[in-house]
Amino acid sequence: MEGVDRKTDLNITRVLFCGPSFPPSHNYTKEYLQNYSFIQVDVVPLDDVPNVIQNYHLCVVKNMRLDSNVISQAKKMKLIMQFGVGLEGVDIDAATRCGIKVARIPGGMTGNAASCAEMTIYLILGLLRKQVFIMGFGNIGIDLAKRLRPFGVKIIATKRSWVSHSQVSCHPNVENGVTDDLVDEKGCHEDIYEFASKADIVVCSLSLNKETAGIINKSFLSSMKEDSLLVNIARGGLLDYDAVVHYLSSGHLGGLGMDVAWTEPFDPDDPILKFNNVLITPHVAGVTEHSYRSMAKVVGDVALQLHAGTSLTGIEIVN
């Protein structure tokens, strides 16, 4: 653990990075803040976080799970944020009760969505190239659609609401808004089974939450076209493991490509690896120097804003 008590000045704003994983995340942040002596950035082993979290004002969770017990000890904490998008490891309700803001870094401006979209292209080309259903048309979905267009594929997509991107209804034939030229057919969440039945490739880029956990289940997989392909670029928990194995074994599912898994790090002895139509990468889609330096700048800027007591920019507050 790096000097939690190294600085005692009450005017110091302390930033806690949970665990040593993905070292560029904290190294680039330290580099960005090196000339600001009033910001202290520490990297603490995961097991030690509960013992020291009370000393910090800003927590960057990475792959740490912050439950209500840990959050209740964060007496000085002003903000918990993810070095990226996923917040499924944070008990947001507990943070809200404790008066702590929770935020993610939107991927659209940092390069994270672009690199995830590029990894998706890699996984798709590693399997096949046909009609694509983008399930969850957020930042990654938009960047993916932009990159798929030159391949001449037909793109269909669903999201809960299209208003935030294109000011249109969920009906497919509306022709206005900035994303209309990227998507051939639009649908809402209730259309996912219908869209799955049309697609040669289904790309899952949903956020993981209570409503979406296990959404790729037997019902969804059975609605997919026989021999179609599934790509998961978001979170492993979106897929029902037993259902995926079943439909791979039966031959109904033509192939699986994923950058995320049910357990991480991934078990090298997992039976799913016996299938020759499964392609797995180790959750590295968003790991590029550009995206990490961009996100480190966001963390650094937020630390400076917290210290100055000004409005927080560059992040998406979720509570």
Image: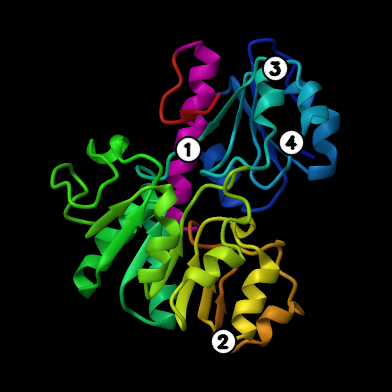
Viewer-side label of 4, 3: 3
Q: CA distance from mark 2 to mark 3?
A: 48 Å
Magenta residue span: 287-310
> Which amino acid does the dot numbered 1 rest on?
Ile
In the displayed structure, 217 sits above or below 173; it is: below
Q: Is residue 140 magenta?
A: no
Viewer-side label of 2, 3: 2
Label 3 SS = helix
Question: In this figure, which residue is indicated by the disc labeled 2?
Answer: 251
Q: Is residue 289 magenta?
A: yes
Question: In this figure, which residue is indicated by the disc labeled 1?
Answer: 105
Viewer-side label of 2, 1: 2
Question: In this figure, which residue is indicated by the disc labeled 3?
Answer: 97
> Which amino acid does the dot numbered 2 rest on?
Gly
Q: Nearer the viewer, residue 204 or 291?
A: 204
Q: Earlier in the sequence, mark 2 or mark 3?
A: 3
| Residue drawn at x 48%, y 56% as measured from the top left | 286
> Which amino acid does the dot numbered 3 rest on?
Arg
Q: Earlier in the sequence, mark 2 or mark 4?
A: 4
Label 1 SS = loop
| Residue drawn at x 22%, y 66% as measured from the top left | 149
| Residue drawn at x 31%, y 73% as measured from the top left | 131
**Label at residue 127:** none
User: With 214 as the anchor, is 75 left or right in this view?
Assistant: right
Asked whether the beta carbons under mark 2 and mark 3 sit within 8 Å of each other, the answer is: no
Q: Earlier in the sequence, mark 2 or mark 1?
A: 1
Q: Is residue 214 visible?
A: yes
In the displayed structure, 210 sits above or below 304; it is: below
Q: CA distance from mark 4 to mark 3?
A: 14 Å
Q: Nearer the viewer, residue 192 or 100?
A: 192
Question: Callout 1 environment at 10 Å: few (<14), some (14 to 19), or many (20+)?
Answer: many
